[in-house]
Image (spheres, rainbow, N blue to C red):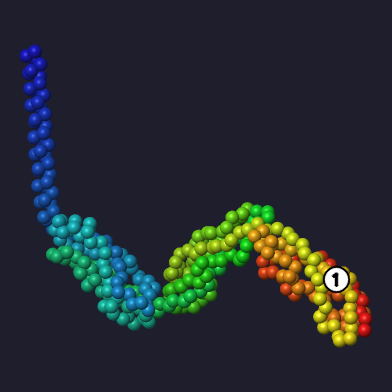
Amino acid sequence: MLKGIKSLFAEIFKKKKINVFLLFFLISFVVWTLVKLANTYTDTVVMKVVYANLADDKILLGGDESMLQVQVKTTGFRMLRQKFFTKEVEVDLNKVSKANKENTFYVLADAAVNKHLYQEIEILKVSPDTLFFTLGKNKTKRVPVIHQLELEFEKGYNLYDSLRVAPEFIDISGPEDVVDEVKVVYTEIKQLEAINTDIDLTLQLLKNDSLKRLTYAQPTVKAIAKVDKYTEGKLSIPLQVQNLPQGYSIKLFPKEVSVTFTTNVSDFNEITQNDFTMYCDYNDVKNTNASFFIPKLAKFPTSLKSYRIENKKINFLIKK
């Protein structure tokens, strides 16, 4: 038992020695770090260039540099703070100088950088030493949107009405020369198959390489359409005769013409004989040896998807 007690005290003493060592090591490391950070160093800080106060009628066409390499001299404390907390250089576009080249401006890099450095940091060198950039005229124009949807319907289905893009027009903005060339904006190409329900899609607006500098008022549009079942119907339509001279009578064989049509199921029961007007024109056979008319459809419902006149020739007998 005495042996066990001795062993326990030895273990505790050993751990105490280790903990004291770690504590002194940590204190030494902190003191060493503080001493080092108090020293003066020369190093390079990378800073991103951002532009501010761009006028509404102007557009930044591009700058030669988007990053600055800033060589500075300061204490380790300030160097760390500069590297971790201030990473951008703001260029005020209201306070820039005009270069000799048209629409080109510049600002001295060290003057821009100096506003974004902490106190007691000495600038040794800035690369590049001058920032050049081009300002162009910004223009906005409204253009139509053209969808590029390919539609394939399930058998027995079709559009109830035309497919609609919303919005139909969008505003585009950018360099004047680029905007002037744009007449329409296209959506992404998409193919839909076996359609049997209403269409409600979000489509991305396309930008090819020449349009990369443009800004769209919105990146997407909606494609909307009502889809309905369609069916086939058939009606007999009475024939009329136009331009028959006075004092003449005419008999037609047959007197009615069959019209076969397709339409949406929801409209089918609304379509009647009175929605159609079919006629033969006497002027078509006047002063000819023709023995028949070709019937013409003058009026029909707008809801028809297609129609077919069954009787292609109408015989007639004319009397004075």
Which x, y percent locates residue 165?
54, 66
Residue at image point 34% right, 82% down: 100
Specify the farthest residue to the bottom: 246
Q: Residue at x 51, y 76 (%)?
A: 181
**Helix or strand or loop: what does disc 1 sit on?**
loop
Amino acid on which disc 1 is placed: Lys
Q: Quadrant of the N terminus?
A: top left
Q: Residue at the spot x=68%, y=54% of the render?
A: 155
Question: Horizontal and vertical percent for residue 229?
Answer: 65, 57
Name the quadrant of the C terminus: bottom right
Q: Nearer the viewer, residue 285 or 23?
A: 285
Which residue is labeled 1 in the image? 255
Q: Choose top left, top right, bottom left or bottom right for residue 238.
A: bottom right
Of residue 222 and residue 90, the one placed in the foreground of this image is 222
Can residue 206 be seen at all in this image of the molecule? no
Q: Please say whether residue 19 is visible from this viewpoint.
A: yes
Answer with left or right where residue 169 lies relative to residue 107: right
